[in-house]
Image (cartoon, rainbow, N blue to C red):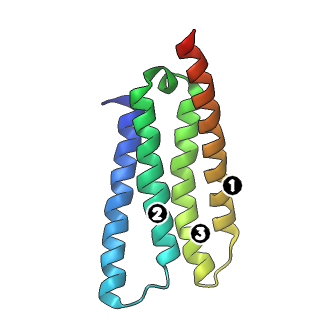
Amino acid sequence: MKGLPLILWIAAIISALIGMAWGIQMSASGDHSLSPAHAHLNLLGWVSLALFGAYYHLVPTAAQGILAKVQAGVAVLGVITIVPGIVQAVTGAGEGLAKIGSVLTILSMLLFLVVVLTSRSRAAA
């Protein structure tokens, strides 16, 4: 594995490690108030980024275009933005960052849909 799939898998693994450590910290402290942010880190960071990377590995033509690179960048930026944004929202520091992260995250999934649909037609040609 190399290129875009590897980058996404590394980002996914880092997300998983942070998520696991955070889960241990929450358990040890008995304070689970930030569990919504923890859950988003695990789902969007570990699961979604790993799935994107797996698709790009399995369909290498999909990873070659600029759109795939933009999609991956937006996805990673979405995780980096939404998780602290949810922390801010839960702690009462405002919802702005969470909203930006949400928009970036849904935009990355929309871009992924376009990548999947267009790479499918390229592979069939």
Distance, label 1 to label 2, CA atoms, is 16 Å
Q: Are marks 1 and 3 in contact (CB under 8 Å)?
A: no
Q: Please report whichever mark, 1 or 2, sits nearer to the chain's N-terminal start.
A: 2
Distance, label 2 to label 3, CA atoms, is 11 Å
Please give left or right for residue 9 compared with residue 33 in the image. left
Locate the N terminus and report the quarter of the image it occupies: top left
Q: Please report whichever mark, 1 or 3, sits nearer to the chain's N-terminal start.
A: 3
Distance, label 1 to label 3, CA atoms, is 12 Å
Q: What kind of residue is marked 2?
A: Leu
Q: Is residue 38 above or below residue 61?
A: below
State the residue in front, 77 or 61.
61
Q: How many numbered marks appear? A: 3
Decide: few, some or many residues near mark 3? Use Cα within 10 Å; few <14, some 14-19, many ≥20.
many
> SS at mark 2?
helix
Q: Which residue is mark 2?
A: 41
State the residue in front, 88 or 103.
103
> SS at mark 3?
helix
Q: Residue at x 55, y 23 (%)?
A: 65
Q: Is residue 18 above or below residue 110?
A: below
Q: Please report whichever mark, 2 or 3, sits nearer to the chain's N-terminal start.
A: 2
Decide: few, some or many residues near mark 1? Use Cα within 10 Å; few <14, some 14-19, many ≥20.
some
> SS at mark 1?
helix
Q: For residue 2, what is the image quadrant?
A: top left
